[in-house]
Image: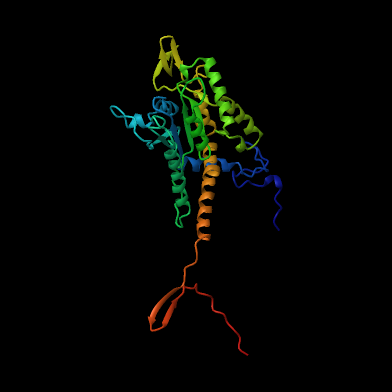
Amino acid sequence: MSEAVAPDAMVSPAVGVPYGEKAGGPVLDFSYVGIDAILEQMRRKAMKQGFELNIMVVGQSGLGKSTLMNTLFKSKVSRKSVLATAQEKIPKTIEIKSISHDIEEKGVRMKLTVIDTPGFGDQINNENCWQPIMKFINDQYEAYLQEEININRKKRIPDSRVHCCIYFIPPTGHCLRPLDVEFMRRLSKVVNIVPVIAKADTLTLEERDFFKKKIREELRANGIDVYPQKEFDEDAEDRMINEKIREMIPFAVVGSDQEYQVNGRRLLGRKTKWGTIEVENIAHCEFAYLRDLLIRTHMQNIKDITSSIHYEMYRVRRLNENNTVVAHTPPAPLQLTSTGCNSFAMTLPPLQPSTPSISQVG
């Protein structure tokens, strides 16, 4: 007859040490299940797959779009930096040019695509100049939709959808131009727009504050909902964080990819006769707030809103259009073909094969 094993002598299969016995290690927690390990699993999977971010920059020539993108990622990522020409002429029509980079930081890989729009706002007649940009954004949604509805679709669909559009406002110090209002009013419905005041070092602090306040008033008056949108706040904590961001929009930024020595520190800035404007110093400009929003705090949220809101609206509209076309398509007409004197053969559309029925004969 076997002896009963005392509870205090039971052996843990994980470590080979009896439960309750101190073997120089931590005491095991009987209540631990291990659900929190899903976070590490997700992290490993994400690290293997890498991330994608597609940013569009829109604004007239000379506002520092390329410089700001280089400053954001501390690399030569802008189109002009990679495909520089001796003298780039202003195009007669708006062009859409994109360039992709593979960036890695501390083991995290990201495919960054920067989409430039040379020619926007540079013409004498800028009527409907937003249409090529709108078409490009919708074309990316369409490409993703076609991949999604394929019978044999890819395990991971390449994401070329525009996640964020940085709109550069000239530092006039007065108000938004009609072009600015019309562009943001139309594009805010299909993409996340983040407006910035370009070359903000040309304004005094008082002029900058007045200009920012004026722009916020005009955005509200014209019903323009820029990122982060109020209606997409998930909870009270998000609402509190996003309210602080909404109070700072548009961000007054200064870009520079030149390093200078200031008080023994090397930093990005713009050197003038009266001193150095430090790009990452929040007392000088709001570049640090823009960088945190786009990269450090809200990058995933920007991508989620693109996927679940903007792309979803496009997908529903396209599928409804297809259903409407099918519903209004008339049935195929009967075809009569002559077979000889006063006799006709009638051709009917093919019938779907039916399941044969079995009848019982008594």
* Residue 256 against residue 144 in the figure, above or below: above
Residue with the most extreme left position: 86
Quarter location, residue 230: top right
Number of dots carrying numbers: 0
The residue under the point 68% across, 46% down is: 9
Colour mapping? rainbow
Q: Where is residue 7 in the image (x, y as percent from the top left)?
A: 71, 47
Q: In which quarter of the image is the C terminus?
A: bottom right
Q: Position of residue 79 (x, y in %)?
A: 36, 32
Quarter location, residue 136: top left
Residue with the most extreme front position: 342
Could you tell whether 241 is left or right of 293 in the image? right
Could you tell whether 92 is left or right of 36 in the image? left
Could you tell whether 90 is left or right of 15 in the image? left
Q: In which quarter of the image is the N terminus?
A: bottom right
The residue under the point 56% across, 41% down is: 39
> In the rendered image, is residue 299 in sight?
no
Q: In front here: 76 or 135?
A: 135
Residue with the most extreme bottom position: 362
> In the rendered image, is residue 318 in sight?
yes
* Residue 227 against residue 322 in the figure, above or below: above
Residue with the most extreme top position: 274
Q: Where is residue 94 in the image (x, y as percent from the top left)?
A: 38, 35
Q: In front here: 160 or 25?
A: 160
Could you tell whether 129 is left or right of 192 in the image? left
Q: In front here: 184 or 248?
A: 184
Q: In front here: 306 or 316?
A: 316
Q: Position of residue 360 (x, y in %)?
A: 61, 86
